[in-house]
């Protein structure tokens, strides 16, 4: 039993560590690709589009592995049904907005402030679930949202005082938070169309995104920027771009794996702790000097997000227990009447 507990604990620790490494590495790599002075490539949509292409290629290759290696997750066959693609299209539009604004936020804000810049996802979750689904939120959950908003406002004020704030980056962060919230809501609606298979949904999302990005790149003038890019024939550049795409699909896999070996609550807490470590790492690596209020804003955002997760988990558990208990009691009473009140 002791060996079993140790083995399970080691597996959980390994998965959580893998999630942290891939997630943090992906953020720093995307920051490098989007705004590095070495590359000087002003084409964030192209970078995002290429990562979607890499995800499609990876899903194609992974579709052959399920039968040969049963110890990994079963990936769906690489079949594109255009009717299903059209039905998934509204979600794909939100998906494109989410990854686009997310990368634009990262491009214009430092990694250390990135989590605060796009911290309003929880707040938009509450607003959108009320406006779209008609679901009300408890006072405790709303209080947690108020803490997050306070942290966001204090962080914006402190970042502005340091002279490093990009208001366009803040705007992109807010829009990214909104799209993340809408993506979660529409995903629940669209999942039945793809047999509730997350990987199949990712296949259609990336397939649609590849075509949705093309007119956007043309409108934003990125075609000319790519044509004039000085490292267009550099193996190093394409290697980094391909690596970014690999991280894109890896984060989806390891996120699902972390939820599988722990729980959704533990995953959210792990993500919050990861964000804290990511912020500290960025400040340390870039030798940044931050005020006490700046750190306090991060603490408010991370603390409010964690508290919201715990509150919602507790409310869902209470709601579940309240539904199960009457059913159990009802079955017990019915059983007594059927057998004349005597135990069988």
Image (spheres, rainbow, N blue to C red):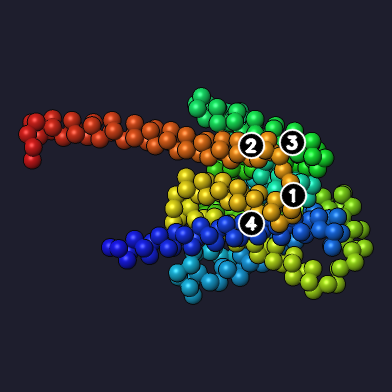
Residue at mark 2 to residue at mark 3: CA–CA distance: 10 Å
- Secondary structure, mark 3, is helix
Q: Earlier in the sequence, mark 1 or mark 2?
A: 1
Q: Which residue is painted at 60% across and 47% down in the image?
A: 276
Residue at mark 1 to residue at mark 4: CA–CA distance: 18 Å
Q: Which residue is painted at 75% across and 33% down in the image?
A: 157
Q: Residue 268, how many percent across, how many down? A: 52, 46
Residue at mark 2 to residue at mark 4: CA–CA distance: 22 Å
| Disc 1 crowd, CA 10 A, few/some/many (<14, 14-19, 20+) | few
| Disc 2 crowd, CA 10 A, few/some/many (<14, 14-19, 20+) | some
Is residue 202 toward the left or the right of residue 290 in the image?
Answer: left
Q: Earlier in the sequence, mark 4 or mark 3?
A: 4
Between residue 266 and residue 243, name the one nearer to us: 266
Q: Earlier in the sequence, mark 1 or mark 4?
A: 4
Is residue 238 toward the left or the right of residue 85 in the image?
Answer: right
Q: Which callout, 2 or 4, points to the residue nearer the camera?
A: 2
Q: Residue 165, how many percent across, how many down? A: 79, 40
Q: Which callout, 1 or 4, points to the residue nearer the camera?
A: 1
Q: Which residue is mark 4?
A: 24
Q: Is residue 136 above or below residue 284?
A: above
| Disc 4 crowd, CA 10 A, few/some/many (<14, 14-19, 20+) | some
Residue at mark 4 to residue at mark 3: CA–CA distance: 24 Å
Question: Dots 4 and 3: beta carbons under 8 Å?
Answer: no
Question: Dots 3 and 1: beta carbons under 8 Å?
Answer: no
Between residue 73 and residue 286, name the one nearer to us: 286
Quadrant of the snapshot with the N terminus: bottom left
Q: Which residue is mark 2?
A: 296
**Quarter of the figure with residue 113:** top right
Q: Which residue is mark 1?
A: 288
Q: Earlier in the sequence, mark 3 or mark 1?
A: 3
Q: Which residue is mark 3?
A: 158
């Amino acid at each position: 039993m002791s060996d079993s507990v140790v083995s399970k604990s080691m597996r959980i620790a390994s998965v959580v560590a893998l999630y942290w490494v891939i997630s943090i590495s992906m953020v720093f790599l995307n920051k490098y690709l989007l705004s590095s002075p070495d590359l000087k490539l002003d084409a964030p949509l192209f970078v995002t589009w290429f990562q979607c292409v890499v995800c499609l290629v990876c899903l194609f290759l992974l579709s052959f592995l399920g039968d040969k290696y049963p110890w990994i997750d079963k990936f769906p066959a690489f079949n594109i049904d255009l009717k299903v693609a059209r039905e998934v299209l509204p979600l794909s539009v939100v998906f494109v907005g989410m990854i686009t604004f997310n990368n634009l936020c990262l491009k214009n804000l430092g990694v250390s402030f990135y989590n605060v810049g796009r911290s309003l996802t929880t707040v938009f979750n509450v607003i959108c679930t009320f406006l779209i689904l008609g679901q009300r939120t408890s006072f405790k959950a709303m209080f947690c949202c108020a803490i997050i908003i306070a942290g966001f406002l204090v962080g914006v004020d402190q970042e502005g005082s340091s002279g490093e704030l990009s208001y366009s980056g803040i705007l992109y962060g807010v829009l990214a938070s909104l799209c993340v919230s809408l993506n979660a809501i529409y995903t629940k609606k669209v999942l039945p169309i793809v047999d509730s298979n997350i990987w199949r949904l990712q296949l259609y999302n990336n397939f649609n995104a590849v075509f949705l990005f093309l007119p956007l790149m043309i409108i934003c003038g990125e075609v000319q920027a790519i044509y004039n890019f000085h490292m267009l024939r550099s193996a190093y550049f394409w290697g980094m771009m391909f690596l970014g795409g690999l991280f894109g699909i890896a984060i989806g896999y390891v996120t699902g794996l972390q939820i599988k070996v722990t729980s959704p609550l533990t995953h959210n807490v792990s993500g919050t702790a990861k964000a804290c470590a990511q912020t500290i790492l960025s400040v340390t690596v870039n030798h940044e000097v931050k005020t006490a209020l700046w750190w306090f804003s991060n603490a408010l955002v991370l603390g409010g997000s964690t508290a919201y997760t715990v509150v919602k988990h507790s409310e869902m558990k209470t709601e579940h227990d309240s539904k199960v208990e009457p059913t159990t009691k009802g079955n017990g009473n019915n059983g007594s009447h059927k057998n004349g009140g005597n135990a069988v």
